Amino acid sequence: MRLAALYDIHGNLPALEAVLADVRRAGVDGIVVGGDVVPGPMPRETMACLQELDLPVQYISGNGEREVRQQMNTGTCGVPPAYRETMRWVAEALDRGHERLFASWPATITCEIAGGGAAFFCHATPRNDSEIFTRLTPDDVLAPMLSGVAAPLVVCGHTHMQFDRIIAGRRVVNAGSVGMPFAAPRGAYWLLLGPGVQLCRTDYDFERAADHIRATAYPRAEALAVRYVVNPPTEDESLRMFARSELTEY
């Protein structure tokens, strides 16, 4: 199969719509959505967009869906205090149908890629949905993480930065983030798989998207619109941030 891998959309509907236009032009057979569709400023609209697609879509759950489900089911979640208002808002914007849908998403899937054999998809690492590693994390630290994976290609996300590297004899590719990139240049990042692996970036109207986000009642609308849509951090800034948290959960 020829697949598009879309990760970390984070409720950024304009970015998703732009990527889907490129995905259709690429002539894929299907899409893998790799988790963290939410939280974000347009959660219902983003979910509706995905559910209305006329392409086959497979989903895996991210830590964002897990935390939103916990908020919906218990009235609390495990995110730092600064983000709890955001999680409450997202949970209230969704309904029980969304909660049941998120609950049905597996943690990992394996798909056959045209000309490339099997690909293993996870959100953060094969072990869980929230461990952090980057293109700089040493191979010997990461090798145990892949010990139970048979596929020659591993696709992940979570840290919102694309990379393509070999670890313990397996190719490990980070899809980057559609809606909230942690590295310049600005854009919506995704993968095209089969044959080969293509790291893709889609341009869209960033200023218009930022205005759309600001028009929502999302508690962190300005921070998202300004920092990650209009003016994302550099890769070096994000790598320094993540270096303090490698192989910890966030």
Image (spheres, rainbow, N blue to C red):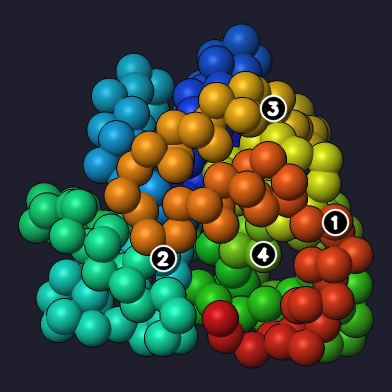
Mark 1 and mark 3 residues within 8 Å of each other at the beta carbon: no
Q: What's the mark number on residue 159?
A: 4
First in sequence: mark 1 or mark 3? 3
Mark 2 and mark 1 residues within 8 Å of each other at the beta carbon: no
Badge 3 amino acid: Thr
First in sequence: mark 2 or mark 3? 2
In what quadrant of the picture does the N terminus appear? top right
Badge 4 amino acid: Thr
First in sequence: mark 4 or mark 3? 4
Asked which secondary structure carries label 3, the reply is strand
Badge 1 amino acid: Thr
The residue nearer to you, when weighing 72 against 219, is 219
Instruction: Give percent across and percent down for residue 153.
Output: 72, 54
**Picture quadrant where residue 155 is located:** bottom right
Q: Which residue is mark 2?
A: 64
Mark 4 to mark 3 CA distance (whole Å): 18 Å
Residue displayed at 24% across by 77% down: 70
Asked which secondary structure carries label 4, the reply is loop
Mark 4 to mark 2 CA distance (whole Å): 12 Å
First in sequence: mark 1 or mark 4? 4
Q: What's the mark number on residue 51?
A: none
Position of residue 167 relative to residue 234, above or below, is below
Look at discs 1 and 4 and give the one toward the viewer.
1
Q: What's the mark number on residue 234?
A: 1
Tell me: 139 left or right of 13: right
Mark 1 to mark 4 CA distance (whole Å): 13 Å
Position of residue 146 relative to residue 57, above or below, is below
